[in-house]
Image: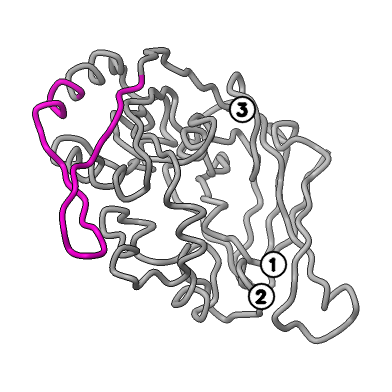
Amino acid sequence: MDHTGLDPVEYKWNYATYEDEALGKKPDKSASLEHESEESVNQWIGKKITLTSNGKIRCTNCGRPTKKSFGQGACYACFSTKAENDMCILRPETCHFHKGTCREPEWGKANCFKKHTVYFANSSGLKVGITKENPVSNRWVDQGARFGLPILEVDSRVAAGTIEHYLTKFLPDKTAWQKLVQGDPPYFDLVKEKEKYLKHLATKEFALETKDGKNIPLKWQPVISNEVSEISYPIQSYPKKIKSLKLSESEAIEDTLVGVKGQYLLFSSGVINIRSYGGYHFQLTVDN
């Protein structure tokens, strides 16, 4: 799902069609055309939604049919060879570009060696994270955070990941999804937390390894603004049961949509992380 705005967030449904299917050809590696629903997903809240799947999956990278989805919609070949699916995306402090082993060096240059922000957010509680998103709030919405505040900026993903990894000694870097879909998180003074940890970081020295094996100082700049972003989501009510709903050939979802938060569709009987079904072929029906 794509999204715009913060009060409230407005969601649009994203889906893809493929050239080979449109031409009546046998599905194979094929370019995709992305589409966006005319209606806002927000308009579906309070209505009965039916989600069904025929079990077919197409790789979100190359379009090739795949029996199993890896990561967030990749076939095994793309999962094993694409830089965007490498372990360093999940653990940026393990970046190995400087060793000459990046899966796709040009992709790495374009995506990893640019300004990144280390931030604090309150989704299911206080957490630390990094992003190259501009505005940073795009990342907070993806995570379902209610509040967010940029902490510092660096010039690469590995630098951001190095500082984030250090801060995980004190703070989580993941959201507890069960708490996320239960209601609003407890209050945290993000400005106070920012000031505390910036003072702490100023006493530490961080280094990055170069291609010739030497260490150079990691430089970072604090974000001057202390403006906390507050985000509201289109939620009529929270689910009565905290249950992760599954979608398969034999298991459809048919229930009233009561809200959307992050990448979760909230139903009366449970929730589904729709991003985890990237590449799946399914049908969505909204009862009016």
| Mark 1 surroundings: few (<14), some (14-19) or many (≥20) residues within 10 A | some
Rendered location of residue 8, percent (x, y): 61, 22
Which numbered disc, 1 or 3, marks the residue closer to the eye?
3
Q: Indicate which disc, 1 or 3, sits on the residue closer to the N terminus.
A: 3
Quarter-of-image position of residue 7: top right
Q: Say above or below: 66 vs 164.
A: below
Rendered location of residue 1, percent (x, y): 64, 45
Q: Secondary structure at mark 1?
A: strand
Distance between mark 1 and mark 2 Cα atoms: 5 Å
Q: Are the two marked residues, 1 and 2, in contact with CB atoms closer than 8 angstroms?
A: yes
The quarter in which the C terminus is drawn is: top right
Q: Which mark is residue 281?
A: 1
Q: Say above or below: 5 vs 48.
A: above
The magenta region covers: 198-223
Distance between mark 1 and mark 3 Cα atoms: 26 Å
What residue is shown with label 2? 56
Q: Which mark is residue 9?
A: 3
The amino acid sitting under disc 3 is Val
